[in-house]
Image (cartoon, grey):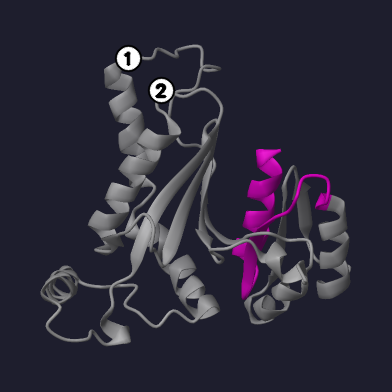
């Protein structure tokens, strides 16, 4: 099933102006959400339904239409994908859960956070949510912002506010590392590479690393609260 996700990402990668959206839905409503999506974006829209979510490709200019989908909870912009991360899984005949192998595997996970992998997706995310802060700060800009916040001497202009983030990892399969360990290493490398501010509660961006066996993809959250609240009336 993970292969189907990779295939839809490949299609967006090869298209002009196409993005892949992952939308979570209540379990059991996947086909309803898929039907909604086809009616909204057209019968030729590439969609893949998976338990609790749908993946679909649309032109980035049509992103504002997504809010018209009534079944969806959360939205993610799906970015770089990796088909063969050479981490050890228990289905590997050479699997051996040792500290040396674990540290090497976590090093490979950290390498997924390289800046070159995410630049294009991050620029699209910034445009889609109309983020006004600094998503690509230099190390000096990060330090200056940190000093300004700590001193509270003056209001910081919105355009100079360094992006605040957290990293999350969802994982399926048997690996040498836990999801928490992967998220910690991945988030640390993101901070090193992008000079962002870690904030686990009041964040601008949740960067989600999804791992299944030896495959992985990165998704940037587009929503903080579930969109199902739109359907609640009093």
Q: Which residue, given by chain and number where applicable, does mark 1 sit on?
A: 98
In the rendered structure, which segment of residues is drawn in magenta?
Answer: 1-30
Query: Residue at 13% across / 75% down in the picture?
Result: 144
Residue 102, percent from left and from top: 33, 24
Q: Is residue 44 above or below residue 52?
A: below
Q: Residues within 10 Å of mark 2 (few under 14, many from 20)?
A: many
Q: Check disc 2 and report its element: helix, strand or loop.
A: loop
Residue 37, percent from left and from top: 81, 66
Question: Would residue 86 be seen by someone viewing this image from the given angle?
Answer: no
Q: Are marks 2 and 1 in contact (CB under 8 Å)?
A: yes
Residue 118, percent from left and from top: 42, 61
Query: Residue at 74% across / 42% down in the picture?
Result: 51
Q: Nearer the viewer, residue 141 or 104?
A: 141
Q: Residues within 10 Å of mark 1 (few under 14, many from 20)?
A: few
Question: Would residue 95 be seen by someone viewing this image from the given angle?
Answer: yes
Instruction: Point out the image quarter for the N terminus.
Output: top right
Q: Which residue, given by chain and number where applicable, does mark 2 sit on?
A: 176
């Amino acid at each position: 099933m993970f292969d189907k996700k990779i295939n839809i990402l490949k299609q967006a990668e090869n298209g002009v102006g196409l993005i892949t959206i992952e939308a979570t839905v209540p379990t059991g409503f996947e086909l309803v959400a898929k039907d909604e999506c086809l009616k909204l974006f057209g019968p030729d829209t590439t969609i893949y339904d998976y338990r609790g979510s749908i993946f679909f490709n649309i032109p980035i200019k049509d992103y504002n239409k997504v809010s018209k989908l009534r079944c969806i909870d959360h939205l993610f912009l799906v970015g770089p994908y990796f088909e063969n991360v050479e981490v050890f899984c228990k289905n590997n005949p050479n699997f051996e859960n040792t500290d040396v192998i674990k540290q090497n595997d976590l090093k490979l996970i950290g390498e997924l956070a390289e800046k070159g992998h995410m630049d294009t997706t991050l620029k699209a995310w910034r445009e889609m949510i109309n983020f006004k802060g600094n998503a690509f700060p230099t190390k000096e800009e990060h330090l200056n912002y940190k000093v300004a916040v700590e001193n509270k001497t003056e209001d910081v202009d919105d355009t100079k506010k360094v992006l605040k983030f957290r990293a999350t990892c969802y994982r399926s399969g048997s690996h040498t590392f836990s999801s928490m360990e992967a998220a910690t290493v991945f988030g640390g490398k993101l901070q090193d590479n992008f000079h962002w501010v870690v904030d686990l509660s009041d964040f601008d961006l949740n960067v989600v690393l999804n791992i299944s066996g030896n495959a992985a993809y990165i998704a940037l959250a587009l929503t903080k609260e579930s969109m199902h609240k739109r359907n609640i009336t009093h």
